[in-house]
Amino acid sequence: MTESSSSAYTPPKVWSWNKENGGRFANINRPIAGATHDKALPVGRHPLQLYSLATPNGVKVTVMLEELLELGHKGAEYDAWLIRINQGDQFGSGFVEVNPNSKIPALMDHSGPKPVRVFESGAILMHLAEKFGAFLPADAGTRAECLSWLFWQMGSAPYLGGGFGHFYAYAPTKIEYAIDRFAMEVKRQLDVLDRRLADNQYLAGDQYTVADIAVWPWYGALAKGLLYEGGEFLQVQDYANVQRWTDAIASRPAVKRGRMVNRVAGAPSSQLHERHDASDFLTKTQDKLQAAD
């Protein structure tokens, strides 16, 4: 008998918070917003200040910034500060001022007369695309296609991360119904992408856009079995067009750099905890810093 069928759960009339029932992330999950402690955010020398971690949502923004720099947009220079969400950095007072939702990534744009805060990864991508006139098509039809796929990702990823990823990899008990429900939805999403990419080089057509930059860190990583150790379970190799697309994006120099920023897992040579200058990729990855100690 499976865990899901061994006992029935009847919700109480009024829900109450059980701190002991949160699984892997119980120490940082709570049903209220706001800061838990006073902590100012650091500010570097560049106009753009990013506070993030190399989760898929964080990678979107560092890839976008590195792509802008690759195009020669010097105004896209940025400082990337590490926010360790497993330690609750996102609940510091300074971070909450930038993002009241206490999620990474969060951006402060100091390039104008008045600082501008931007939170939610999709909003940050659009802010940067419009600011620099890049990766957002000018043609009305192609732009609409691009934005449709961008917002598809924003709406779909919670099923992948909070749904499939949570119940398959992180939940304290394996619930058959929940895993089946979200696995079905994630495979449907992969099929949506695969069908679109059968006749299109990129999601908006023949142009690489913010849509690809948004979708790739989630579904590209999934297609390579890098998320939740769920590749075999979901048979991700069957989505040949997604595989072609993700390999093409992964080979881009800016994408390779963007994946490294604020990364705290994997090979030390792939981890650049903070990024303040282009030279940091050569001198301040964790393998270099460890060798210098």
Image (tube, grey):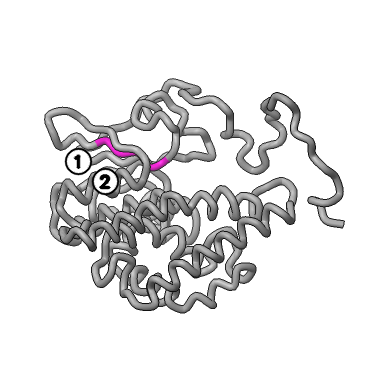
The N terminus lies in quadrant: bottom right
- Dominant SS in magenta: strand
Q: Decide: is 120 above or below 18.
A: below
Q: Is residue 157 left or right of residue 106?
A: right
Is residue 154 in view from this perspective?
A: yes
Q: Which residue is mark 1?
A: 46
Q: Residue furthest top?
A: 38
Magenta segment includes 256: no
- Residue 258: image x %, image y %? 33, 57
Q: Residue at x 49, y 59 (%)?
A: 266
Question: Which mark, residue 253?
Answer: none
Q: Which residues are magenta?
A: 104-108
Which of the marked residues, 2 or 1, is nearer the chain's N terminus? 1
Q: Residue at x 56, y 48 (%)?
A: 162
Q: Inspect the image, locate mark 1, and give the three-letter code of the amino acid beneath it.
A: His
Q: Mark 1: which secondary structure?
A: loop
Q: Mark 2: which secondary structure?
A: loop
Q: Which residue is mark 2?
A: 276
**Front-most of 67 and 179?**
179
